[in-house]
Image: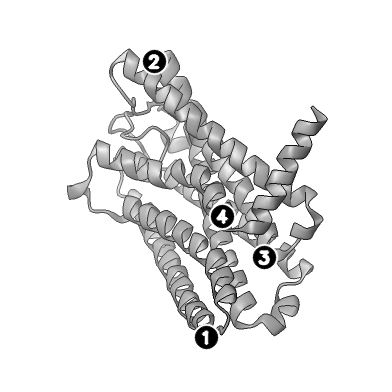
Amino acid sequence: MSNSSSMSHFLQLALADMQKLQLLHFCLLLGISLAALLGNGLIISAVTCGHHLHTPMFFFLLNLALSDLGSICTTVPKAMHNSLWDTRNISFAGCATQLFLIYFFLGSEFCLLIIMCYDRYVSICKPLHYGTLLGSRACAHMAAAAWASAFLSALMHTANTFSLLLCHGNALGQFFCEIPQILKFSCSKFYLRELELIAVSSCLVLGCFVFIVFSYVQIFRAVLSIPSEQGRHKAFSTCLPHLAVVSLFLSTVIFAHLKPPSISSPSRDLALSVLYSVVPPALNPLIHSVRNQELKVAVWRLMTGWFQKH
């Protein structure tokens, strides 16, 4: 990263110019982060304490909740600090760390969503082989592979991005450090190397998206053939929330990183970044639990037990 060492800090995007609006954004971000912390914390606690929830589906949901917590804790606290203290500065090392962490947690979330899709596919389309294909050891290996893949991908993108010579300013058009924003400062043709890496990564993401679509086509075909209306309802109640989460996450991430510069604007970039980095961690617990009776019962027992003790 020696080529960029002359740049000591970056200026992140201010969410508002007026102090009253900055305080409003602070309160809004505080509410969203508290909702994400509460929702994901309840899922982690319920799955950990509820022995009847020690199944592959809830194991991967626990990992997804951990990823969501890491994601929102990487971006929102710094944005809240900037709004409260009316500052925009972030150090070079801080920016590199934030970029690494956000891509690490986003990458792990994407990998876990693919694994959860595979879990739904096996449980509905190949129920007789579920215990064999998704045993405890296989689940642990898949979760470890998801986190390791995300770590290596984030490390590669971060090292590649911050090895560029940056000399075209330091004002980011985003409230957190993001690769497309850093590439705008490059004064070397080597930034094409990172663009090629993003293109390769995007092709892999699209390939995984095709796998998800194919899996859900098979899942819906199998669900519609279930004679019992109650069975169909239960299958749809576990599949549709996951499909909603995948659709929101992938569509916003892909569009944010592959959109042409001609349609780029600060307000649009800000809205997209919020949709894939802030909204999913807050909404995922609600989406996954609202139609899952087992999880709702476990969370309710956890909360009532806590209140009775206190």
**Label 1 CA crowd tier, 10 Å (few <14, some 14–19, many 20+):** few
Q: Which mark is residue 86?
A: 2
Q: Earlier in the sequence, mark 4 or mark 1?
A: 1
Name the element at disc 2. loop
Q: Give the secondary structure at mark 3.
A: helix
Q: Are marks 4 and 1 in contact (CB under 8 Å)?
A: no
Check residue 184 in the rendering and tell me which mark sits there, or answer none. none
Give the residue displayed 34% in from the left and 52% down from the top: 257
Q: Name the foreground residue: 302 vs 259.
A: 302
What amino acid is found at the position of numbered circle 2 in the picture? Asp
Q: In the figure, residue 89 lies in which quadrant? A: top left
- Mark 4 residue type: His
Instruction: Specify the amino acid type for callout 3.
Output: Met
The amino acid pointed to by label 1 is Ser
Q: Earlier in the sequence, mark 4 or mark 3?
A: 3
Q: Is residue 112 above or below residue 308?
A: below
Q: Is residue 126 above or below residue 308?
A: below
Of pointers 2 and 3, the one earlier in the residue sequence = 2
Q: Looking at the figure, which quarter contains the C terminus?
A: top right
Q: Residue 42 appears in which quarter of the rendering?
A: top right
As measured in the structure, the alpha-carbon distance from the residue carrying label 2 to the one carrying label 3 is 43 Å
Pick the residue in front: 271 or 170: 271
Mark 3 or mark 1, earlier in chain: 3
Q: Residues within 10 Å of mark 2 (few under 14, many from 20)?
A: some
Distance, label 4 to label 1, CA atoms, is 24 Å
Of pointers 2 and 4, the one earlier in the residue sequence: 2
The residue labelled by disc 4 is: 288
Q: Which residue is under mark 3?
A: 142
Q: Which residue is mark 1?
A: 225
